[in-house]
């Protein structure tokens, strides 16, 4: 039937099984837009900061550099554990180990958010608010936006965790795992940049 | 329409300070200007780089997939192609 025609014999097969899952392409495009979003926030921060006479402004509290460094390590560790969890997922009969490691990664991410919330309460008590200065406004805007992303990514991870339950078919969670992984890596990857620019420089 | 675009391009080309749109951009210090130009360049090039990289990655994955699929198909369906017959010998 195919003899003498220009029809690609593999075309039908290719369409049935795409080389990249739609969800993965979708999250990749989403992450591109998110990178631009954070880049624009950082741009606004740098322009406003460079125009200020003193940074942080006089009378405003200093940010807790050491405590946040510890929190940064926790978040990076969470990303590493997630990476190891996916490696276990790819091995045969290691889904339960992978699920436990994924759970650990979620707990580390949750710790990061809660610790940051505690830090915010302290800063608010010291007088750093959204309206106290450009410094406070930009701090809560950028770090708060990141925190919202962490919470959203945690929901992604929790969904994957539920799909790896023993009562369900783990192979069906493959795309979900990759998607939640990409989003979490983005959240983990952007944090050191924010930490460096806002806490250290 | 084209005339208007040409006028705008000519003005921004010969008088670049006119294209600075807000007080932060041109009233600020040297450091502010440097931050403005630096981030404007990054914000202009970053989406091009990311979309380009993404498109290239998708293209490469499809290419790899096609070559693997074609190989598998030929292994399983050799009869789909006619074997070349040699000329009859006397």
Image (tube, helix red, strand yellow):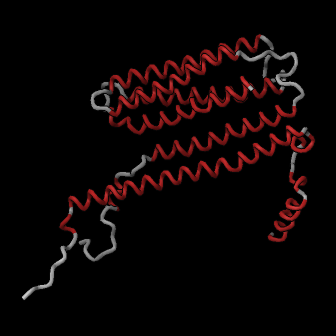
Q: Say which quarter of the image contains residue A139.
A: top right
Q: Going by the picture, which residue comes out furthest to the left?
A: B90
Q: Quadrant of the C terminus of chain A?
A: top right
Residue B39 location (% of width, % of height): 75, 43
Q: Is residue B3 above or below residue A169?
A: below
Q: Residue at x 54, y 30 (%)?
A: A153
Q: Going by the picture, which residue comes out furthest to the bottom?
A: B90
Residue B83 versus residue B73: which sits nearer the camera?
A: B83
Q: Quadrant of the N terminus of chain A?
A: bottom left
Residue A66 versus residue A172: which sits nearer the camera?
A: A66
Q: Residue at x 77, y 44 (%)?
A: B38
Residue A37 location (% of width, % of height): 67, 40
Q: Is residue A158 visible?
A: no
Q: Say which quarter of the image contains residue A85.
A: top left
Q: Is residue A151 visible?
A: yes
Q: Is residue B77 above or below residue A157?
A: below
Q: Residue at x 63, y 28 (%)?
A: A192
Q: Residue at x 19, y 76 (%)?
A: B84
Q: Say which quarter of the image contains residue A81.
A: top left
Q: Is residue A108 above or below residue A39?
A: above
Residue A74 location (% of width, % of height): 55, 19
Residue A64 location (% of width, % of height): 71, 15
Q: Going by the picture, which residue comes out furthest to the front?
A: B90
């Amino acid at each position: 039937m195919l003899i003498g025609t220009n029809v690609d014999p593999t075309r039908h097969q290719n369409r049935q099984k795409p080389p990249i899952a739609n969800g993965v392409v979708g999250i990749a495009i989403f992450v591109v837009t998110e990178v631009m979003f954070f880049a624009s926030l950082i741009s606004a921060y740098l322009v406003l900061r460079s125009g200020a006479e003193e940074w942080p402004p006089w009378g405003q509290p200093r940010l807790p550099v050491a405590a946040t460094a510890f929190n940064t390590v926790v978040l990076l560790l969470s990303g590493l554990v997630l990476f190891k969890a996916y490696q276990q997922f790819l091995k045969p009969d290691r889904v339960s180990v992978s699920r436990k490691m994924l759970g650990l990664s979620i707990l580390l991410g949750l710790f990061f958010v809660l610790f940051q919330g505690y830090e915010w309460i302290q800063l608010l008590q010291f007088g750093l608010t959204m309206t106290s200065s450009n410094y406070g406004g930009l701090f809560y805007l950028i770090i708060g936006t990141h925190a919202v992303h962490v919470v959203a990514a945690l929901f992604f991870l929790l969904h994957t965790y539920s799909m790896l339950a023993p009562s369900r078919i783990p192979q069906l969670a493959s795309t979900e795992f990759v998607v939640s992984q990409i989003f979490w890596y983005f959240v983990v990857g952007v944090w050191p940049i924010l930490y460096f620019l806002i806490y250290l420089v | 329409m084209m005339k208007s675009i040409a006028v705008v391009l000519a003005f921004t080309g010969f008088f670049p300070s006119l294209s600075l749109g807000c007080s932060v951009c041109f009233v600020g210090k040297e450091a502010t200007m440097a931050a403005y130009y630096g981030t404007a360049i990054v914000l202009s090039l970053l989406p091009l780089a990311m979309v380009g990289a993404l498109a290239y990655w998708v293209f490469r994955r499809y290419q790899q997939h096609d070559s693997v699929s074609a190989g598998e198909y030929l292994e399983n369906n050799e009869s789909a192609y006619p074997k070349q017959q040699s000329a009859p010998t006397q």
